[in-house]
């Protein structure tokens, strides 16, 4: 190769080298955003999976707590119901006892009055009998 032939070859090599650099740069510039997009999508997928897993864990914990609270509420309601029933039973028992006492007290008072009247009549009859006995002795 002569000096004049070497210059175009060198020039072509430089130009070819520049072309390779430009192509490489273009590929890299295109590859970088694509790689960034792939990375962003992968990070988004990982974060979404973590989020879904944490939400699932929280939902499970919430469901367990909700069941526990429902059971505690039901037990408390049952205790209140039993307490109310016992209280109502005691009140009714006291009212019934009072009504029975009132009803029987009136009957007892009537019976006491009848006994007193009978005792008075017996005393009166005894007095009459004594008087009759006195009259019979005199005759």
Image: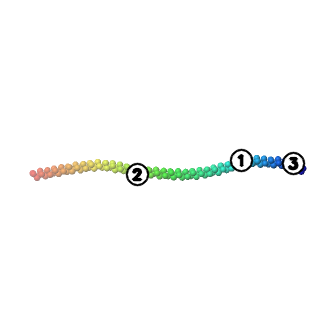
95 vs 60, nearest the viewer: 60
**Residue 7: assigned label:** 3
Question: Which is nearer the N-term, disc 1 or disc 3?
Answer: 3
What residue is shown at x 21% (from left), y 51% (from top)? Answer: 119
Where disc 2 sits, the SS reads helix
The x and y percentages for residue 131 are 14, 50
In the rendered view, does 71 fall on the left or right side of 137?
right
User: What residue is shown with label 1?
Assistant: 33
Question: Which is nearer the N-term, disc 2 or disc 3?
Answer: 3
What residue is shown at x 42% (from left), y 50% (from top)? Answer: 84
The crowd level at tag 3 (other Cα within 10 Å; few <14, some 14-19, many 20+) is few
The residues tagged by marks 1 and 2 sit, at their Cα atoms, a distance apart of 77 Å
User: What residue is shown with label 2?
Assistant: 86
Question: Which is nearer the N-term, disc 1 or disc 2?
Answer: 1
The x and y percentages for residue 125 are 18, 50
In the rendered view, does 31 fall on the left or right side of 105?
right
């Amino acid at each position: 190769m002569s000096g004049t032939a070497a210059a175009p070859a060198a020039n072509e090599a430089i130009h070819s080298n520049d072309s390779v650099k430009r192509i490489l740069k273009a590929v890299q510039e295109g590859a970088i955003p694509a790689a960034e997009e792939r990375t962003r999508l992968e990070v988004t997928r990982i974060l979404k999976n973590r989020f879904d897993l944490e939400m699932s864990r929280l939902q499970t914990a919430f469901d367990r707590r909700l069941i526990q609270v429902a059971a505690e509420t039901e037990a408390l309601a049952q205790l209140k119901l039993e307490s109310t029933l016992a209280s109502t039973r005691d009140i009714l028992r006291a009212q019934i006892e009072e009504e029975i006492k009132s009803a029987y007290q009136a009957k007892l008072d009537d019976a006491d009055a009848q006994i007193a009247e009978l005792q008075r009549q017996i005393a009166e009859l005894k007095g009459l009998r004594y008087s009759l006995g006195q009259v019979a002795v005199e005759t």
